[in-house]
């Protein structure tokens, strides 16, 4: 067959006109198959009706005038495609046929179609496909070859292909039907010119593929599962073989399968599985590999809680992990129970936040951990413990505390024993985890020694002081009177209960106390209350460190020292001058009245009398008797004199004296009043003229008048000659 193909190829190259698309692509080593036509049918249409021609060594194509009839020749060439090798990839298919010697008059041409109809029983129905050729024919004989690869490949599923040859359908001159326009092709008369398909196959190419081992690149068993992917380039079956080395194939060639179980060589470390594929054409792939690390050793590690602390006051803790493995630790699982693992595996971390079991119960807690490496090996379980101490060991008292009452001490569940001042007062029974209370009613220094369930001892001391401090308070060294609101408080204090650190505070009304307690001091500057009764009371509270409070008070009389002022009293010649208490003018800081006055000097003219008795220098006159004090000027004497006096608040006299001036003058005459118009009544405006009387040598400063009995007094000043009033 190969020799025949080679001879045929030489013939084509020597005597044929090669189609340009095909030229240069036909090589002996690629031309692997010749398929001859199975049948050639000479279809002809005679005067519009189709019929099958008698057939001969050639078949006409085109228009022919014969015996007065117009004939159109359209032969059909059938090929069986059963011989095409489906296991190979087609590179090209060429249709080869020969054109017989012909007159080639009137420029015949040739059309070729692929046909999609293979029913010989219905031979006159030809379903044309794409036109494969349309060209004029200029000389004969010759052979033609051209590419029909696409069409033939599309018909492989039918295993048949058919080509329809057509040409001119009428005379080149419509007025001369006898002019022929056709050519002839060989069918079976010449071996190398008969229609045939030249099939060329591609060099066989191997399939594509890859191999992988299920998992993450690690395994803890020699048995693994392989995932194999093979991608044939033509859809044909693929075979495979596998091994644990590149030159030792454990399996023979076998049909491809996408997965399979595989056994690795024993011994920990990196492992490689090799894969090779081939197709039916025998094309081999390169070797594909998949790698995995075999690791059968469990990881090791340990855990601590809160950096190794023995106790915690909060149920949320920090776990510190240490994991060791040849290939690293990837995951960890944590539990509060040694035989239960309700929580999922989580990525390995050197620290992890965790909540202890029964977070409201105070007791020893244990956390369990196990580790996993990338191969899936799980470590032995390891653990760490810590005591959960939700509150203080004892509550209700503090070390160094001071109390003024009975105290109740709350004992945490981890308290084992309690000794008070050397005597055991509490011991916990085995299995008892309840909170206990211990009442202490003693007084004085208390020392408690507490032992916990780990045997650790803790001691604390405190004081119970129920007695308030004692003390005294006096004002200004126990004086009973002061003329100043600014005083000095004198204080003593003594703490009888032993807690010490006495503090004090003060108040003027027992309701409003100074803002802050202050440490005890023997003296305290203080401001007495400004208003109110003369007796002022200061209140004091003393407080010790146990908050026991005692209260004391002291009183003092406060009267401000009055300040007398100068004053003028007037009188008439020959008349007694009577004093009022208001004539003795003074100022007093506490707004109270003075108690009495004392005559410091007497008038140099005239005499002073008190209830008819002459007043002497230094005589004290009570305030309520000043109304009985009078001055008798000398007979017919006109002029000025004075005396001085001091006031007392009942406890001491003023520092300064007041000057009482006495002015004696002539008594003025009564003024004259004239009314115009005169009469008892009038309906006109009334003019009242007041003519002042004569005045004495001391002069008259002002006069006053009023109109009507109920009218208001009105003053008018100098000059006093006349006053006109329009009423």
Image (cartoon, rainbow, N blue to C red):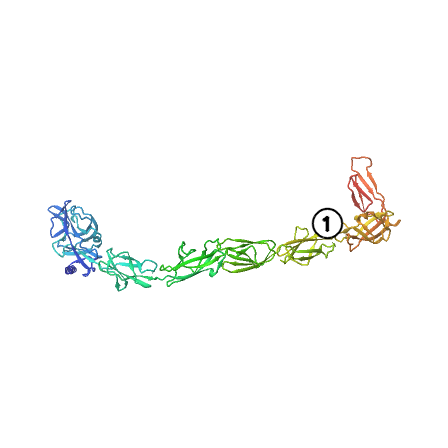
Q: Secondary structure at mark 1?
A: loop
Where the C terminus falls, by quadrant?
Answer: top right
Determine the image quadrant of residue 8: bottom left
Figure label count: 1
Q: Position of residue 592 (x, y in %)?
A: 75, 50
Q: Quadrant of the N terminus?
A: bottom left
Q: Is residue 120 left or right of residue 239?
A: left
- The residue closer to the viewer here, 73 or 355, is 355
Query: Where does the image place residue 375, in percent across and percent down from the top left?
Result: 35, 60
Q: Residues within 10 Å of mark 1 (few under 14, many from 20)?
A: few
Task: Name the image quarter holding residue 349.
Answer: bottom left
Residue 15: % across, % down: 15, 59
Residue at the far bottom in the pictured view:
247
- Disc 1 designates what residue? 533
Q: Position of residue 149 (x, y in %)?
A: 21, 55
Residue extending furthest toward the right? 635
Residue 181 in view in this figure: no
Is 696 or 720 nearer to us in this picture? 696
Is 46 in front, or is 384?
Answer: 384
**Residue at 32% in and 60% down:** 221
Residue 400 located left or right of residue 705: left
Question: Which residue is nearer to you in this view: 133 or 32?
Answer: 32
Is residue 261 in view?
yes
């Amino acid at each position: 067959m190969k020799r025949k193909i080679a001879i045929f190829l030489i013939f084509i190259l020597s005597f044929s006109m090669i189609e340009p698309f095909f030229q240069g692509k036909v090589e002996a080593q690629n031309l692997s198959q010749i398929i001859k036509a199975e049948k050639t049918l000479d279809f002809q249409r005679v005067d519009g009706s189709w019929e099958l021609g008698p057939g001969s060594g050639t078949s006409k194509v085109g228009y022919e005038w014969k015996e007065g009839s117009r004939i159109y020749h359209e032969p059909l060439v059938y090929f069986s495609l059963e011989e095409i090798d489906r296991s190979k990839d087609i590179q090209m298919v060429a249709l080869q046929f020969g054109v017989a010697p012909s007159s080639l008059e009137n420029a015949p041409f040739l059309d070729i179609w692929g046909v999609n109809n293979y029913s010989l029983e219905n031979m006159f129905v030809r379903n044309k496909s794409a036109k494969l050729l349309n060209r004029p024919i200029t000389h004969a004989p010759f052979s033609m070859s051209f590419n029909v690869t696409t069409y033939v490949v599309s018909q492989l599923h039918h295993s048949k292909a058919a080509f329809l040859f057509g040409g001119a359908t009428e005379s080149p001159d419509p007025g001369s039907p006898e002019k022929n326009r056709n050519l002839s092709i060989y069918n079976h008369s010449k071996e190398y010119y008969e229609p045939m398909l030249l099939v060329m196959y591609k060099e066989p190419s191997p399939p594509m593929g890859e191999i992988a081992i299920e998992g993450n690149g690690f395994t803890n068993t020699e048995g693994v599962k392989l995932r194999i992917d093979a991608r044939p380039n033509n859809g044909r079956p693929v075979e495979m073989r596998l091994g644990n080395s590149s030159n030792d194939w454990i399996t023979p060639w076998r049909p491809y399968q996408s997965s399979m179980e595989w056994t690795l060589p024993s011994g920990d470390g990196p492992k490689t599985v090799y894969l090779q594929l081939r197709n039916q054409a025998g094309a081999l792939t390169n070797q594909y590999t998949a790698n995995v690390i075999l690791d059968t050793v469990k990881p090791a590690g340990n855990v601590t809680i809160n950096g190794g602390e023995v106790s915690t006051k909060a149920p949320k803790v920090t776990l510190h992990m240490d994991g060791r493995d040849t290939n690293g630790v990837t995951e960890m699982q944590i539990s509060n129970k040694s035989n239960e693992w309700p929580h999922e595996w989580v990525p390995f971390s050197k620290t992890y936040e965790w909540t202890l079991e029964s977070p409201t119960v105070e007791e020893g807690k244990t956390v369990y951990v196990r580790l996993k490496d990338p191969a899936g090996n799980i470590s032995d379980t390891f653990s760490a413990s810590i005591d959960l101490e939700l509150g203080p060991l004892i509550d209700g008292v503090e070390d160094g505390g001071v109390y003024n009452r009975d105290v109740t001490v709350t004992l945490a569940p981890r308290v084992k024993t309690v000794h008070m001042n050397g005597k055991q007062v509490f011991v916990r029974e085995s299995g008892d985890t309840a909170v206990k209370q211990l009442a202490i009613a003693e007084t004085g220094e208390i020392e408690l020694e507490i032992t916990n369930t780990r045997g650790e001892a803790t001691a604390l001391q405190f004081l119970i002081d129920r007695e308030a401090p004692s003390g005294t308070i006096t004002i200004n060294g126990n004086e009973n009177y002061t003329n100043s609101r600014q005083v000095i408080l004198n204080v003593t204090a003594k703490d009888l209960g032993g807690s010490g650190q006495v503090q004090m505070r003060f108040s003027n009304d027992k309701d409003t106390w100074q803002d802050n307690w202050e440490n005890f001091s023997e003296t305290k500057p203080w401001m007495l209350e400004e208003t109110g009764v003369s007796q002022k009371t200061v209140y004091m509270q003393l407080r010790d460190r146990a908050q026991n409070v005692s209260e004391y008070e002291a009183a003092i009389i406060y009267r401000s020292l009055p300040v007398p002022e100068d004053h003028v009293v007037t009188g008439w010649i020959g008349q007694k001058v009577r004093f009022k208490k208001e004539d003795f003018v003074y100022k007093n800081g506490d707004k109270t009245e003075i108690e009495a006055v004392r005559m410091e000097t007497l008038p140099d003219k005239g005499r002073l009398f008190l209830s008819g008795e002459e007043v002497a220098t230094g005589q004290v006159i009570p305030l309520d008797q000043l109304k009985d004090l009078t001055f008798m000027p000398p007979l017919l004497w006109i002029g000025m004199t004075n005396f001085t006096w001091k006031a007392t608040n009942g406890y001491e006299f003023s520092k300064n004296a007041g000057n009482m001036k006495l002015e004696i003058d002539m008594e003025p005459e009564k003024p004259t009043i004239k009314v115009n118009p005169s009469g008892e009544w009038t309906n006109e405006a009334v003019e009242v003229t007041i003519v002042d009387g004569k005045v004495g040598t001391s002069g008259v400063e002002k006069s006053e008048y009023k109109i009507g009995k109920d009218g208001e007094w009105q003053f008018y000043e100098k000059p006093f000659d006349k006053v006109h009033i329009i009423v």
